[in-house]
Amino acid sequence: MTRIDLNSDLGEGFGPWPMGNDAAMLDIVTSANIACGFHAGDPAGILSTLRKAAERGTAVGAHIGYPDLVGFGRREMNPSSAELVGDTIYQIGALQGLATAAGTRVTYVKPHGALYNTIAKDARQAADVIAGIKAVNPSLKLLALAGAPIVQQAREAGLVVFSEAFADRAYNRDGSLVNRRLAGAVLHDPAEIAARMLRFAQERKIRTIDGVDIDLDADSICVHGDTLDAVEIARALRKQLEKAGIELAAFAGSHD
């Protein structure tokens, strides 16, 4: 039986400003990438999301990012190695403390936004994030962009790496994500997305924004939690996958 993980970025509300529906998403996904306060999320909100994840037995990952609340972590930055290593350690450590209080634990790390896309191809910043993860706990898994150079780089550095495909994002021919500033970069139709990702799960192929099929090998599918259609997309996707007999299970369980 084909098996795949379904993950989403959660815990991104800030004070009185909610972001997405964490409770509904946690009823659907198998892994939750929880904000660590740098790109989004406040401690009370993060703790609340962690408690909901713990209640459901959902795997928890540290969704680390650049210190960019105003830009939601989607603006490129070029921190020094000392800064980036420190920021990585700080964010994972903060989430670990909150996770312990919530009765769960952090089992993996998934960088967010601009940091995620930068380290996919920037070996220096990738090395800094890898070093930060290993300094905290070398048994933490890394969730990275399928086919990106960081996958091999992190494995050579000793990390266990899993890769992901994006349900609601358009792809370029080289396997990179289409820039969010471009038309068609973000997908919104739940039925179209579900059919697209069912094909990916069965054939490991995905169609690019210009209509070319590319091979993509991934262990997890991501649905962003901050879009208006997030819950509907995730629900339609899960239903489609289960109907096809595909097992949904976390790649890094809460008790790994």
Image (cartoon, rainbow, N blue to C red):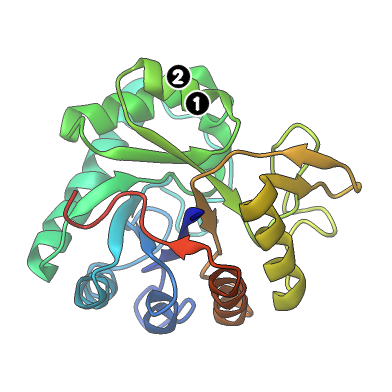
Q: In the rendered view, would you say 75 is above or below 249?
A: above
Query: What residue is rendered at 51% in x and 29% in y?
Result: 78
Residue appearing at x 15%, y 63% in the figure: 104
Residue 4, which numbered label?
A: none
Residue depicted at x 27% and y 69%: 46
Residue 125 placed where, x, y %? 45, 25
Q: Amino acid at mark 1?
A: Ile
Task: Please say if 106 is above or below 120.
Answer: below
Q: Residue at x 82, y 53 (%)?
A: 182
User: Which amino acid type is shown beneath numbered disc 2?
Assistant: Gln
- The residue labelled by disc 2 is 153
SS at mark 1?
helix
Is residue 211 shown left or right of residue 216?
A: right
Whole-Å distance between the Cαs marked 2 and 1? Answer: 5 Å
In the picture shown, does residue 108 fall above or below 123?
Answer: below
Can the viewer see residue 178?
no
Q: Nearer the viewer, residue 247 or 36?
A: 247
Decide which of 165, 44 is in the foreground and name it.
Answer: 165
Percent of width and height locating residue 223: 56, 64
Find disc 1 in the rendering and name its residue: 150
